[in-house]
Amino acid sequence: MLHAHAGSRAEADVAGRILIVDDEPGMTRSVGILLRRERYQVNEAASVAAAVGLLKLERHHLVITDLMMEPLDGLDLLVLIRRYQPACPVVVMTAFATPESHREALRLGAVDFVEKPLQPDRLLPRIRYLVNG
Amino acid sequence: MTIRGLAEWYRGLGLRAKFALHIAGSILLLFGLIVPAVVYLQTEAALEQARHRGLELTKVFAHASVHSLVADDFLAMRHIVNSIASDPGVLYVMIHDRQGRLLVHSDIRRVGESLSDPVSAAAARADKPVIQDLPDARAHAEDFTVPIYVMNETPAVARIGISFAEEMAKIRETRHVILGVAILALAAGVGLAGLQARSVTRPVGQLVEGADALSRGRLDHRIPESMGGELAQLAGAFNRMAGSVQALIERLKQSHDALSAAQDELVRQTRMAAIGQIAAAVAHEIRNPLSALSTCVQLLRRDLPADSEDVELIQIIQTEARRLNEIVSDFLTFGRPRPPRWEAVVLADVIQEAVTLLQRDPRCSPALAFDLSLDPTLPAVPADRDQLHQVLWNLCLNAVQAMGPEGKLRVDTRWADGRAVIRIEDTGPGIPGASTSRIFDPFYTTKAGGIGLGLAIVRRIVEDHGGDIAVESSQEKGTCFTLTLALEQKQTSPGAS
């Protein structure tokens, strides 16, 4: 209740709500700070389960997820997201891309597939486009 | 020499010597049996004939003497005696009475003498023709005695002594001739045996030589089959055997080569799979922190005033982070290569692009000269554009880094034998030592700050394209890489992905 209130108070000046999912805390924290500075509201999840919990609670404008996680991975999240927020675009990022994982991610509905290390200068315009349309 | 020693010596003899020895033995045995038999028979026949003649002569002498004996006509008797004694071989001619008193003798001085030697004694008693050996004669001689009949009485005996020296000389001569013939036959036999043995031992020697050569690994050795007969068959069989052995060993060698090639390939694939797994794990573990690091640094940089000294520090962090990521990328590219995505690639475009990027790169000295000589008639080659770009980039960057502040990079393309040839030549110091053969090995490096995968990736991509890469290097001229690519796609994989 308190959380929701705080959210709605900030609603006026946020550019959009983004969920970032990665089991590497350094990644979620750094990308979180980067996006908040760009005036997005950012939720961070360290696992697919935590991400699903957040997706059930709030509507998001964009999900950025890592691919390789345990026990459920980014591809599982792509499937689960269709159940809760079918319209939400998903960007998949990975430290190690293979042609197979790339193809599979796009088949399951990912709109973008980026390799780590992330390049903020290229990523931010793409996020702005995906969130605002 | 004992019998055992003799047998030992015989076993040690060569085939030829044994052959000659056998022939000589046979000839000696043959003559040893024949010569005494022939000589004995001939001697007997000659003596028999001579005895017969002697006896007949004595009988004629006895008969002819009867009349003169009765008439006591000494002169007529002497006449008969002399005519008989003049015969060659006649030793004596005589007539004596039963008491041994000589009535007539070829030696006239002995007439009247009484003979008492055993032969004469036996002759005096003879009542029929008798033949006796004369023991004291120099050569073989015999005494022939025939009683003389006068009115049914035999008052005296006629005797003739005959020497067989002439017959014996003839027999000796015959024996010598036979001996000579035997020696000639022996010599000829041994000689012929040697020749005959040679016609056997020479092919056998060739067989022995062939077997020896085969045992020493000279599998292409063959024996001439010109000798004919069983030996030719043997040589033929030997040659066929050698051929089979050679073919067998050739097949063995081939399957061994194939096996070791397959084994090498298996080892290489296993190693590459392991490197691939390590590369994936390393990429995951390094790129995540690297990504967080880059993001944080970029955030920090935004807040700094443009003239702050810390901007340079942050640039250093970013450059080094980029380098780390390049190493991970190289490791991944090498360890987990992707198959080429075939398309028609204009080499000149890719080369131009790589060189342009290189000229803007901070690692490239602005004083370096670039000389591109690209054949405009060269058609597009089937290749993976990104991978080809990486090959050219790696080779050109190596050249630029090797040359340092000054030098010239020359890139040219041409056709040769239906293939595109790209040469990348620098004026650098060349590749040190004998390491040209190793520079394509993974993790081999001669420059500081590299992990030695650049050229391994280059070779791998070129091989995936069905091409070749070669390097020449010298201290004076620098280094030249020659890249050859097929103008037509070798693989049957789809042309576009």
Image: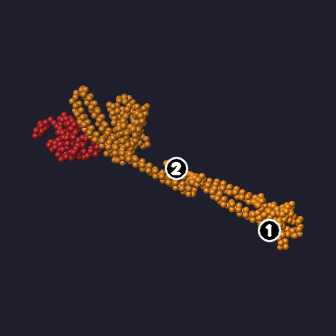
Chain colours: A red, B orange
Residue B154 visible here: yes
Element marked by disc 1: loop
Estimate how packed mark 1 is, as few (under 14), some (14 to 19) or many (20 or more) residues with alpha carbons within 10 Å. some
Element marked by disc 2: helix
Query: Residue shown at 18%/37% (left/top)?
Result: A40
Q: Nearer the viewer, residue A129 or B94?
A: B94
The quarter in which the C terminus of chain A is drawn is top left
Residue B370 visible here: no
Marks 1 & 2, CB-CB < 8 Å contact? no
Q: What residue type is labelled 1?
A: Arg
| Label 1 to label 2: alpha-carbon separation | 88 Å
| Circle 2 residue | B212
Q: Is residue B41 above or below residue A110?
A: below
Chain identifier of the residue bearing label 2 in the image? B
Where does the image place residue B457, in percent across and percent down from the top left?
35, 40
Query: Residue shown at 30%/41% (left/top)?
Result: B279
Residue A52: which numbered mark, if any?
none
The quarter in which the N terminus of chain A is drawn is top left
Left or right: A36 in relation to B239: left
Estimate how packed mark 2 is, as few (under 14), some (14 to 19) or many (20 or more) residues with alpha carbons within 10 Å. few
Q: Nearer the viewer, residue A129 or B155?
A: B155
Left or right: B105 in relation to B254: right
| Circle 1 residue | B125
Q: Is residue A33 above or below residue B133?
A: above
Left or right: B113 in relation to B299: right
Chain identifier of the residue bearing label 1 in the image? B
Where does the image place residue B212, in percent across and percent down from the top left?
52, 50
Q: Quadrant of residue A71?
A: top left
Q: Which of B132 and B37 is in front in this view?
A: B132
Q: Is residue B453 above or below residue B67?
A: above
User: Which residue is the extreme one toward the bottom?
Assistant: B152
